[in-house]
Image: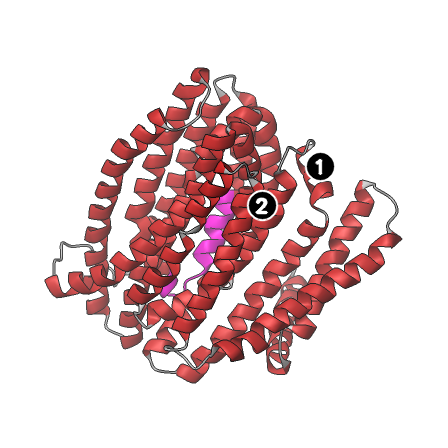
Amino acid sequence: MIVSLYTVRVILHVLGVEDYGIYGAIGGVISSLTIFTNALSAAAQRFFSAEIGRGDNGSLNRVFNTMILLYLLAGIIVLIIAETLGIWFFNNRMVIPPERVDAAFVILQCTIVSFFISILISPFQAIIIAKEDMKIYAYVGIYDVIAKLLIVYLLQLFDQDKLILYGYLLLISSISSQFIYLLFTINKYSEIKFYFYWNLRTIKSILAFSSWTFIGCLAFLFNAQGLNLMINVFFGPIANAAYSIGNTVKNAVNQLGSNFFVAVRPSMMKEYVSNNIVYVRQLFLFSTKVIFSLLFMIMFPIMMETDGILSLWLGEVGEYMVSFVRLMLVWALLLNISDPITALVQAANKVKSYHLKVDLFTLLSLPLTYVAFKLGATPIWSFVVSVVILGLAHIIRLIILRSIIDVGIRYYFFNIILKIMLAVFISFGISYLIRNLFVSSSVIALFCKIALDAFIAIAVSYVFVLDREERMRINEMVRICMIKLCGVCASR
């Protein structure tokens, strides 16, 4: 996360605000498409988890090969759409300075190729997650960090068009990351063998699940990139640059919650398939609270010190950046605490009702934002509308959840929402009371306030969000980690 934020500062300086805004409008699609493919892999993960839970390697291998075939077909369809409708929109609707059209087109093509490869590799990522072999994510994470730093270095080393070079380097980084998953799967899982397999019954089951998941992912993609493109049409690349900065902060924070839940999702699915509902309910409540606590620990200092952090990070804070960052952090929080609900819906195979009701409702943010812009609203209102819509959509999620496990809206409100709201209000109150101690505006004072806000957030979450048993579970986890850490240090 730290490296991601650092590299954005350098890239913004190297590319300039206008080119960075162009990349935000076109190349920024990569981040949303990555989320899209991750959601697609949830369909594969659900079927893989069920077969692993049953202990049938032969059936698992057949489902895996069926997934590869289906995702190849899906990738080809998406590639055709991107190279026709995508290029039409690029040529006829996007606001790009004439002298930068060629560079922007290169970014578009790099994005399309990267997306196509990520679709093909999705089944390999899904089998790794279903096997709960999480070390590979640490390895790929280390690789991504090295790649980002290398890209920053190369951008400053060569004199070619920086935007075009940036697009090619990101494409190479993305493809190589995807192929790490491919090579790991081939070498790690001897029970996975490649052959052509076509079973109509299996395909129907997968497509019935995947089609609704696809609609949900498509709705998210329309929301994320629809807002970005609408901002481009109404306000131009400069506003897109502010959007990209907010989106970068959101993605960096969002990665923390997403990576935590990657480790929880397969266990939740397997236990639900095994009908261990009591444990699933406990895991659902615990994971929701931990996701909030982890994100709030990072979000709270950023929201309290947005101006100072952006000034230190970017050097110059552009218009709308502060508001975009704060609102997109709230957006990220709402999305992350809905992940446990989505996982249970997928485990119960009730995706049709879920995506029709929830995702179609969230699409209301696009026409409402369009109306607001037509009436003269600033770009900030796009995220105000989105946050309100996401909050209302969460209520719909809870109504659907009641039919899956015994967690009613009233229980969820008093045991999660009310505790979260209490933690937020107490944290803001404590921070405002003690921040008068820091009269200096120096960098050291800023870091002290950030550290203090992070401590307040995690301490208040620990006391007010978690219940007694959950605190004991966290204490035991910390104790075991400390023992292992001390053992490693002693051995050295």
Residue 249 is labelled as: 2
The one nearer the camera, 175 or 325, is: 325
Is residue 70 visible in the rendered image? The answer is yes
Label 2, residues with CA under 10 Å away: few <14, some 14-19, many ≥20: many
Residue 479: x %, y % from top left: 65, 74
Mark 1 and 2 residues: CB-CB less than 8 Å, in contact? Answer: no
Label 1, residues with CA under 10 Å away: few <14, some 14-19, many ≥20: few
Q: Mark 1 = which residue? A: 311
| Residue for point 83% across, 54% down | 435
Verify whether residue 143 appears in magenta. yes
Residue 438: x %, y % from top left: 86, 50
* Amino acid type, residue under disc 2 in the picture: Val
Height in image: 488 above or below 161? below
Residue 130: x %, y % from top left: 36, 65
Q: Of the residues under marks 1 and 2, which one precedes in the sequence?
A: 2
427 with respect to 403 (left or right) = right
Tell me how many marks there are.
2
